Image: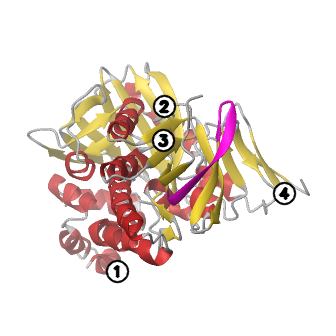
Amino acid sequence: MAVTADKGRCLRCGGCVGVCPVAALRLTEHGIECSSKCTGCSACVQFCPVGALRLSGGKD
Amino acid sequence: MIEIPKEVDVLVVGMGPGGSGAAKRCAELGLKVLGVEKRAEIGAPKRCGEAISRHGMLDRIGIKPEGQWIMQEVCGAIVYAPNGKSVRVDYKGPEGWIVERKLFDKHLAALAANAGARVLAKVEAKNFRRNDGKVTAELEYEGGRHEVTAKIVIAADGVESMVARELGVNTSNKLVDICVGAQFEMAGVKGLTNLIEFYFGNDASPGGYVWVFSKGNGTANVGIGVRKPWAKKTALEYLEDWVRSQPRFRDASILEVNAGGVPVGGFLESNVADNLMVVGDAAHHVNPIHGGGIPEAYMAGKIAAEVAAEAVKKGDFSKKFLKKYDERWNRERGGSLKKILKLREVMESMSDDDLNWLVEYLKGDDLVELSRGNSGFARLAKILMKKPKLMKLARKLV
């Protein structure tokens, strides 16, 4: 599983990183990066204040 | 690139108010301290309504409200119930200020630098590991990278903190415990005064509230906080809907769009590990009723710095020694913030009808006392006892 951010929408607030239970997300100067630790729990997607995150299924 | 130190007593990660509070106090106490900020500009982008109370400014941060960063004096507040009825409190003079975070945060960082701290923006610290009783981290900056070794790391890296998690304190928030925020900084807003405005209602802002904080000259921060699982749309959609519903914004402009998560759900058991102390948003140091965190972060930073100075003197950077920071924070702030958390839990259990009813009984001064966690709990409990359905909630407060 992996999360991708719509770069046009993402405001880089980093709140999604704060709700990720497995520390899979990271806020960098390029935006949100998702590592292979992602379990697909979707907490970040539900959190996102601007609806910028999408979960893509299967193995990354 | 200017030279970056390779060995310090304290590495502060994140130069918001918590980091600046820590770095300044470390420097004052004679420690060699480096404060790094991964963003290119300290204080931007803001994730904040920019309001600070008088008590927070003068006592917790300890600075005079003078400078370009003061946008507006706050001389009272008005709180609207879902049905539009309101409670209002007026003061004779300013009881708080709306600041410009871009300028304010930089001012705090400059105070830290003037005290002797080294402050560097656009430097990211990562890959923390313990090594021979100290911590080594990689500093990545424009044009290079190198390692820095610190006796103590103060993690002030915000809601997205990774430093604490890398060094053994799990700072992650449960979804229900984080307030989802969106904000427009607007211009051309009608009807602004020196009162800060709050709007409650489970339809318009489930689990949170809407705020309108004037910044002077017809500009204002117009923001919303909502919480899952109650919120069914994004925070930005709730904000857009609310702004559209208010005629005073019809011709207004949008100068900034902000978003962020506010950790309002309570406090971590411990904010220390070997060589590590966590402060500010990263440590969930936020007033759980209104979400304000600037003075909380700054004060936690100061306490962490004072414990760091003791630790350096003793040569003891163990979790056991740094527990002093937990103990001091609990004593000086934790107790009253935990009480306020209970109040928030009571408030969010109330329906719109309950809130409409409550506003009839509350006075402006009650609101202020309640939000500060000073007193007023017994009075609120007494009011809630009048309504049989709310008696159970009332008991939570006493």
Circle 2 SS class: helix
Query: Which residue is denoted by mark 1 in the rendering?
Result: B392
Marks 2, 4 in one chain? no
Q: State left or right for residue A58 relative to residue B219.
A: right
Please tell me which residue lies in front, B264 or B252.
B264
- Residue B47 badge: 3
> Do callouts 1 and 3 mark residues in contact (Cβ within 8 Å)?
no
Please tell me which residue lies in front, A44 or B99.
B99
Q: Residue at x 43, y 55 (%)?
A: B280
Please tell me which residue lies in front, B141 or B382.
B141
Q: Position of residue B227 (x, y in %)?
A: 52, 56
Q: Report the span colored magenta.
A: B140-153
How far apart are the two marked residues, 4 and 1, measured between alpha carbons?
Answer: 43 Å
Camera-nearest label, 2 or 4: 4
Q: Residue at x 25, y 50 (%)?
A: B56
Few, some or many residues within 10 Å of mark 3 (<14, 14–19, 20+): many
Marks 4, 1 in one chain? no
